[in-house]
Image (tube, rainbow, N blue to C red):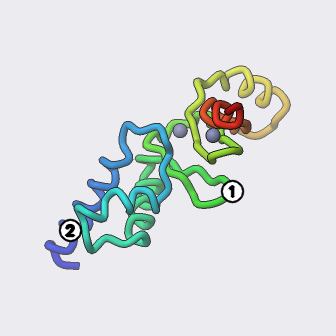
Amino acid sequence: MDTSMKTKFSRQREAIRKQLSGRHDHPTAETLYEELKEEFPRLSVATVYRNLNQLVESGEIAKINLNGPARFDYNPEPHSHFVCKGCGCVVDMSDNNDEALIAARKNFDGDIESCSSQFYGMCSQCIKETAQ
Ligand SMILES: [Zn+2]
Ligand SMILES: [Zn+2]
């Protein structure tokens, strides 16, 4: 890979990282691609996906595997999520995993490092819509 290629690739990765940073909607690679393709006309979903996976591997972001396409989280710290059964949105939950961790460690011989949970239900927006 020559230097200009390298620069181009890291520029894309930087843009992908920036696009993900600070947001709480846990977008899919497809969503990020849709948002970035105007700025990077030669970008493909596969490239976005590959860059996201590289950022996951280096611990800069996190990947959430749910039913359906993987979602990406700018916050790599273990935390819990709410998943809406109606619209599929993924929302960060304020964590209270310490007690769960302490309880789990008591009954486990190995070394438990972290804990994150997934909560399922209907988000307020979906409840509003079904009530109409
Ligand atoms: Zn919903
Ligand atoms: Zn999250």
Does residue 106 sit above or below 121 in this rendering? above
Tell me the residue that label 1 is attached to. Answer: 67
Quadrant showing the C terminus: top right
Name which residue lies at 66% across and 53% down.
66
| Residue 8 in sight here | yes
Closer to us: 102 or 60: 60
Task: Check disc 1 and give the amino acid type.
Answer: Asn
Q: Position of residue 119 (x, y in %)?
A: 71, 36
Q: Position of residue 27 (x, y in %)?
A: 48, 50
Q: Position of residue 52 (x, y in %)?
A: 42, 58
Q: Is residue 78 above or below residue 32?
A: above
Classed neighbour count for the residue bearing mark 2: other residues with Cα under 10 Å, few (<14), some (14–19), many (≥20): few
Residue at the right extreme, as displayed: 107
Q: Which mark is residue 8?
A: 2
Residue 101 lies left or right of residue 23; in this view the side is right
The answer, for residue 112, to whether it is visible in the render is: no
Q: Nearer the viewer, residue 11 or 69?
A: 69
Nearer to me, 77 or 64: 64
Looking at the picture, does residue 22 appear above or below residue 12? Answer: above
In the image, taking residue 80 as reference, residue 74 lies left or right, namely left
Labelled disc at residue 45:
none
Nearer the observer: mark 1 or 2; the answer is 1
Residue type at tag 2 = Lys
CA gap, disc 1 to disc 2?
A: 33 Å
Q: Residue at x 64, y 31 (%)?
A: 128
| Quadrant holding the N terminus | bottom left
Q: How many marks?
A: 2
Of callouts 1 and 2, the N-terminal one: 2
| Residue at figure coordinates x 47%, y 56% from the top left | 57
Q: Residue at x 70, y 37 (%)?
A: 130
Q: Quadrant of residue 129?
A: top right
